[in-house]
Structure formats: C-alpha cells, structure tokens
Image (tube, rainbow, N blue to C red):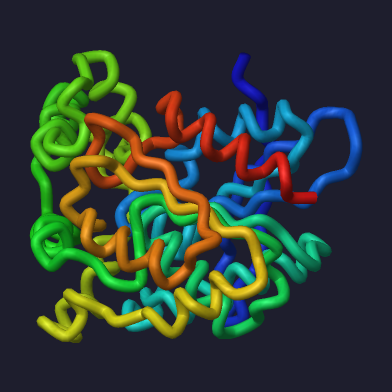
Amino acid sequence: MTQTFADRRFTSSDGLSLYARDYGGADGPARLPVIAIHGLTRNSADFGTIASLLAQSGRRVLAVDVRGRGRSDRAPDPMTYRPDVYARDILALLEQAGIERAVFLGTSMGGLITMALAGLKSRVIAAAILNDIGPEVSPEGLARIAAYTGQPVDTPTWAEATAYVRQTNGVAFPHYGDEDWEAFARRVFRDGPEGAPILDYDPDISVPIRAAGSKALVPNLWPSFRRLAKGRPLLLVRGATSDLLGADIAARMRKAAPKMAYAEVTGVGHAPMLDEAEARAAIFEFLREVP
C-alpha cells in the first residue's frame, strides 16, 4: 500500500517558494523524521516507494524538491544552483517545520548536500544515508551526467519521453522493462504548456557546472565526509555497477569511516532507487538502531 503525502511549502532565505512531500509517520513511538534529498536532475518523486515504507514504519518523511526542480521555484540567479545554497534551503525547511534533528537520506547530489550541511550545522544530522555518492566521484560517471544535464530535449509524446530516460539511464537499470521506463518518465517529466512532456527541472541548473569547468568534475569532499562520519551512524548504499561511485572510492570511504554500514545493490548502477530488496533491508536494519 502506498502511503499518501501532504504538500508542504517552505521559503528559502532569498524568497523562493520551495516544495516537499510530507509523508506522515504511522502511529507508534515518536521517532526522528527523515529528510530525503534527490539527485541533480530529479525530484521528490524518486523516493515514493522508500518514503511510503518508512512512513508506514512510523517515521515522518519529508522528501524535498530542491530549488529549480519539480514543484519548487526556479531561481532567478542560476549561480545559486550549488550544494551550499541547497544546504541552506534545507536548514530553512527544518526551521520552518520545527525539526531540530533528523535522519538524512541523500541520493547522489542529495548526499553532497548532506555533506555540505555537516559543515554548516552538523548537529541537525542525527544519522545519514548516502546513496551512491561519496566525497570523491569517478570522472567518467560525472561526465556522463553533465553531458545531458540542461540540454534541450525534443519529446513531443510520452513515448519519446520514455525513450529518452531509457537512453540516459539504461546503463544503470539493465533489468527494467517497458512499464518501469514509463514510470521513470512520469517521475522526471511533466506536461508542458503545449501538452508535450518537458523535463521537470530548470535547464539552468547546469550553469554553475559549466562555469566551473573541469574543476567541478572531481570535487574533493573528504574533510566534509569525515565530519559527517564522526560521531553519528552512517550508511553507504552503492550500486554494484555504478559509474559514479567506483568500488575503489567506496573502499577508501570504508577505510576512512570503519564504523560506517555498507550495502551493495547487485545489477544496478547509478543510483539505486532504494526500492531494491538489498537497499530496503539495509536501510531498515540501519534505522533500527536510530531513535
């Protein structure tokens, strides 16, 4: 059974109206809520399955649309599309929702935002789950993502939108069938003003990436990762065939944070959808020890 959610809005420090899906936790003992933050070109819909399961287990889940994505406002200044600004937006959400501490679940860019948040206000993070992201990334995977981010697409029909997501994400989900790709397209496209599907994000999210050039392709966030790992539970979920978080980087992360829990999702690349059996089991086992 899919858990329903309420639409919540919050306001950024620079006046944007931002959006979150608010999945109310089922009855039971009070537990820390989960803040779920998606990847670069995605939105809160990515967490539909895992957020429902977590809410049914008793945890409230707030799955955000980061500025420029989904139902959140587009930023007038595209240079605000960067992790430190996104992290401050999350702090605004916490303040306006009256949340002092939470578990953070970050997929790809969402994990980078979580690491940035550890530098801004570490105490709000009670525990963290990083989904296929680390303090260092493989340049091949980042180059693949950067190649299509913000680029115009011609998708006059939903069939063509489905073909687009299959083309750009097929390497990560080789087991997906037609229905899976159709559902994927519905998560990342929306009906445009002329009726044709359009990508559900501001193309200008790519402006800071292009401005930074090659310097942006391999960020070094090891100090942020160590700060995140210090003194709190941490779980890393990795797609076994990920081209963004290589096995060598994951191994170095585990060496730097020996208490970090780890799970690998077989047959999946960047990034697991967290509806896979291995991912679900790892997340629930991890959260069992978190208040």
Q: Position of residue 138 (x, y in %)?
A: 17, 64
Dividing the picture into quadrants, the one containing residue 101 is: bottom right
Q: Is residue 26 visible?
A: yes
Residue name at image x 53 percent, y 74 percent? 87
- Is 121 situated above or below 251? below
- The picture places residue 175, in percent across and down from the top left corner, at 20, 21
The tally of labels here is 0
Q: Is residue 260 left or right of residue 161?
A: right
Which residue does the image show at 25% across and 42% down from the upper left? 198
Depth order, front residue of 47/6: 47
Q: Is residue 139 above or below residue 102?
A: below
Residue 187 x/y as whole percent: 37, 35
User: Looking at the picture, does residue 194 appear above or below residue 72?
Assistant: above
Residue furthest right in the image? 29
Residue at (53% x, 30% y) in the render: 281
Which quadrant of the rendered structure holds the N terminus?
Answer: top right
The answer to which image quadrant residue 221 occupies is: bottom left
Residue 74 can be seen in this image:
no
Determine whether, in the image, residue 189 is placed left or right of residue 98: left
Residue 29 percent location from the top left of the image: 90, 37
Q: In this rendering, would 250 be left or right of 160?
A: right
**What residue is drawn where x is 65% and y is 24%?**
3
